Image (spheres, rainbow, N blue to C red):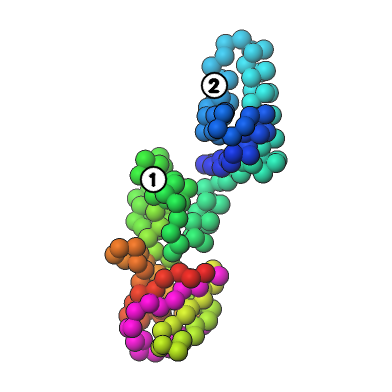
């Protein structure tokens, strides 16, 4: 089971350190791992007790979040279409490829932490046409997308239509509603 630890500057306070003075949580995790290297069983146990207690305090104080791969994938699907910081959690890190992932997971769907989502499939909840003749669509995920081009649709979108949104060139997105010709969209909510 993959686990992600997310920390903040506040997590350092759980150890009595001030931000900027102590190690970040990646280094704190390394300190827990380093306990395994101690030869003396009493020292090893004391090390684990100390480091795990600091981690538990941070987790219970919500300074550190513990997420499994499924939680991360769900969050990334919910954020699809927004410009996000370039951190591995949101999927732009090439150096975070997961060991053991199969080829099906690399084909552009939602995968592990290091893979980028390039398409999303959802159901249409509602669609409304704006005064300019462009569409505003809401998906069953809660996301709302606005048409940004002038492409005319041959038929009006209907609730329960399948919507496939995919990444396009230069950070733009294309949405195909009910299998129709794609329109250019941007995420608004």
Q: Quadrant of the N terminus?
A: top right
At 30% from the left and 63% from the top, the residue drawn is 170
Q: Quadrant of residue 140?
A: bottom right
x, y percentage for residue 128? 49, 85
At 35% from the left and 44% from the top, the residue drawn is 94
> Marks 2 and 1, Cα distance to the nearest angstrom?
26 Å
158 in relation to 119, above or below: below
Q: Quadrant of residue 64?
A: top right
At 34% from the left and 87% from the top, the residue drawn is 152
Is residue 111 on the magenta stretch?
A: no
**Tag 1 residue:** 93
Q: Is residue 9 left or right of residue 168?
A: right
Q: Determine if residue 56 is in view.
A: no
| 172 vs 113, nearest the viewer | 172
Sequence-wise first label, 2 or 1: 2
Q: Seen from this angle, which residue lies furthest left?
A: 169
Q: Determine if residue 51 is in view.
A: yes
Magenta stretch?
142-159
Q: Is residue 169 left or right of residue 82?
A: left
Asked if marks 2 and 1 touch (Cβ < 8 Å), the reply is: no
169 in relation to 2, above or below: below
x, y percentage for residue 162? 45, 76
**Tag 2 residue:** 34
Mark 2: secondary structure: helix
| 73 vs 23, nearest the viewer | 23
Q: Callout 1: 10 Å neighbours few (<14), some, many (20+)?
A: some
At 57% from the left and 28% from the top, the residue drawn is 22
Mark 1: secondary structure: loop
Is residue 145 on the magenta stretch?
A: yes
Principal secondary structure, stretch drawn in magenta: loop
Q: Quadrant of residue 177?
A: bottom left
């Amino acid at each position: 089971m993959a686990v992600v630890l997310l920390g903040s500057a506040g997590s350092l306070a759980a150890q009595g350190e001030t931000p900027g003075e102590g190690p970040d949580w990646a280094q704190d995790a390394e300190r827990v791992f380093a306990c395994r290297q101690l030869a003396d069983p009493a020292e090893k146990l004391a090390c684990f007790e100390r480091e795990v207690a600091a981690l538990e305090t941070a987790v219970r104080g919500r300074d550190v979040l513990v997420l499994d791969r499924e939680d991360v994938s769900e969050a990334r699907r919910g954020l699809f279409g927004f410009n996000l910081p370039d951190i591995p959690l949101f999927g732009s890190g090439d150096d975070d490829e997961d060991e053991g992932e199969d080829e099906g997971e690399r084909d552009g769907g939602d995968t592990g932490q290091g893979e980028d989502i390039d398409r999303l499939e959802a159901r249409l909840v509602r669609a409304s046409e704006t005064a300019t003749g462009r569409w505003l669509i809401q998906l069953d995920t809660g996301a709302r997308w606005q048409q940004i081009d002038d492409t005319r649709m041959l038929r009006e979108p209907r609730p329960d239509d399948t919507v496939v949104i995919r990444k396009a060139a230069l950070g733009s997105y294309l949405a195909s509603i009910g299998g129709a010709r794609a329109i250019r969209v941007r995420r608004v909510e």
